[in-house]
Amino acid sequence: MSLTLLAQSALGGLLHGGIYALLALGLSLSWGLLRLVNLSHFALAFLGAYLTYHLGTGFGVPAWLSAVLIVPLFFLAGLALHALFVRFKVTEFASMLVTFGVTILIESLIQWIWSADFRTYDTSYTQESLRVGPLFVPVLELLAFVCAVLLALGAWLGLHRTSLGKALRAVAHDGPIAAAFGINARRLSYVLAGLCAASAGVAGVFIALTSTLAPSQIEAWIGVVFAVVIIGGLANPLGALAAGMLIGVSEAITMAAVNPAWAPLVAFSILIILLLWKPKWL
């Protein structure tokens, strides 16, 4: 195998890792700060992807405008779902079961409206790429990666450099003590839940632009992104970004140098090795 082909594969994997990071970001924050394992995050992302596809192919709405419409809508959906969690006092383990059920419902809704057929959202810029020496950089994947970097940096700065972020971390660390200092944990939890759902909307827009859509893909992505969250560390946006890049590159090199059928094993192999090694961030 030539070095150019290997480098092209690694670059493609690195950019694809940005999609993983976008999907992992909301789950990482929800799980780490709210103690809610929100599996419906994946289904929301694919619902956002299908809405982007439908608005683009059916009504000619550009992807950026679809994002302007979808992200606030998903923020409200996140608030509504979190209201149910608060109302029924859903625990961490129960949240995984409840949101798995929500995932099945959303997947069934997608299949009912758009069928189980594979769908592709082709735009005038789908095949555009930049040439850097012997390598080609797909524009859409590059935009997704840049967006992932910006959101991860923004989330990290928000958690560590703002009063809101410090309050969220304080509540996650010791809720009763934080409440004693006047922090309104419930209000903060709603804000964070809405933002996590909104990030799923952002991920959905880029999934529509860069991937072939099918309802069954929701389960296929859950395992990989779960591994990204665990490897990156809970409530660690930069960790999720780094883990997404690691798994993306590892999968791409495996597909190019070994066998494409082995790629799904990469994420869990890396996860098992790191869990056995037990680095400090896990």
Image (cartoon, rainbow, N blue to C red):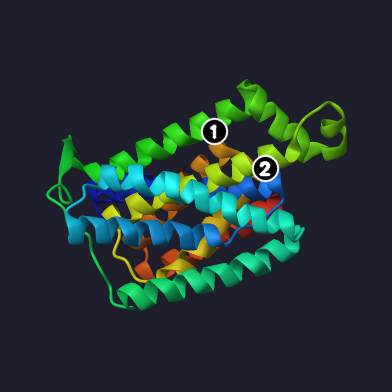
Q: Which residue does the image show at 64% across and 25% down from the upper left?
A: 160
Which label's residue is closer to the chain start, 1 or 2? 1
Tell me whether circle 1 and circle 2 mark residues in contact (CB < 8 Å): no
**Quadrant containing the N terminus in the rendered view:** bottom left
Question: Which residue is situated farthest in the left direction here?
Answer: 124
Tell me the number on the disc at residue 189.
Answer: 2
Is the residue marked by circle 1 packed among few (<14), some (14-19), or many (20+) residues within 10 Å?
many
To which residue does mark 1 refer?
155
Disc 1 on helix, strand or loop? helix
Compared across the picture, whether 79 is left or right of 6 comes to: right
User: Cα distance, mark 1 to mark 2?
Assistant: 15 Å
Q: Is residue 21 visible?
A: no
Q: Is residue 261 visible?
A: yes
Q: Which residue does the image show at 34% across and 74% down from the upper left?
A: 113
Disc 2 on helix, strand or loop? helix
Is the residue marked by circle 2 packed among few (<14), some (14-19), or many (20+) residues within 10 Å?
many
Q: Position of residue 32 (x, y in %)?
A: 68, 45
Q: Which residue does the image show at 84% across and 26% down from the upper left?
A: 181
Foreground mark, 1 or 2, reads 2
Q: Position of residue 237 (x, y in %)?
A: 56, 38
Q: Which residue does the image show at 33% across and 78% down from the upper left?
A: 116
Compared across the picture, whether 253 is left or right of 63 comes to: right
Above or below for 220 versus 127: below
Q: What type is the residue that disc 1 sits on?
A: Ala
Residue 114 in which image quadrant: bottom left
Residue 183 in which image quadrant: top right
Residue 262 in which image quadrant: bottom left
